[in-house]
Image (cartoon, rainbow, N blue to C red):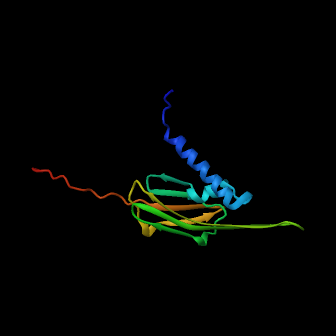
Amino acid sequence: MSLVRWNPLEELDRLRREMDRSFARLWGDSFDQRELAPVSRGWWPAVDLVETEDEMILTADLPGIDPKAVRIEVRKDSVVLEGRVEQSREESDERYWLQERRMQSFHRTISLPAETDPDQAKASYKDGILRVTMPKVQPTPKGRILTLGD
């Protein structure tokens, strides 16, 4: 008898395969695990954050999302993006009819490396790209150096 090294990732993969088989038995051929993958992992927009000398610029990819369904909260040290994705698709033929809907929400908080002024922040949306520009707050000195004898 030989020893076999235990690999926890193999156990997880085995468990996933067993669950897939169980779902397939319940729902038959209509079950497609690829359809569940984005829902189980969640979705949030890809974000780029750039710091210039005077401001922080955040861009987020929001293709196909109604800008009215997006909420942006700018704080002095972070930006919160929230929204809802609602998409539908219809196909029909003489003997075939299909209608699918995808409704999903996202919530993402991005920490900022510099303090910003939320009251001066501006947002724009064009061609599926959200751009938030936030002026940086100029740091105030934490102390003062005194000289004697002048």
Q: Position of residue 82 (x, y in %)?
A: 52, 66
Residue at 73% across, 60% down: 30
* Quarter of the image where one finds residue 140: bottom left
Q: Is residue 101 above or below residue 114?
A: below
Q: Point out the residue furthest to the top here.
A: 2
Whether residue 45 appears in this view of the structure is no
Q: Seen in the image, is 149 located left or right of residue 108?
A: left
- The percent coordinates of residue 114 (x first, y second) are 39, 55
User: Which residue is nearer to you in this view: 85 or 70?
Assistant: 85
Q: Is residue 10 visible?
A: yes
- Which is nearer the eye, 51 or 69? 69
Percent x, y of residue 67: 61, 69
Give the residue furthest to the right.
94
Pick out the residue farthest to the left. 149
Q: Nearer the viewer, residue 18 or 96?
A: 18
Residue furthest out toward the bottom: 68
Which residue is painted at 64% across and 69% down in the image? 66
Image coordinates for residue 48, horizontal then vertical, percent: 53, 53
Q: How many numbered dots are placed on residues in this image?
A: 0
Q: Does 106 sit left or right of 127 as displayed? A: left
Q: Nearer the viewer, residue 76 or 68?
A: 68
Q: Is 125 situated left or right of 144 in this image?
A: right
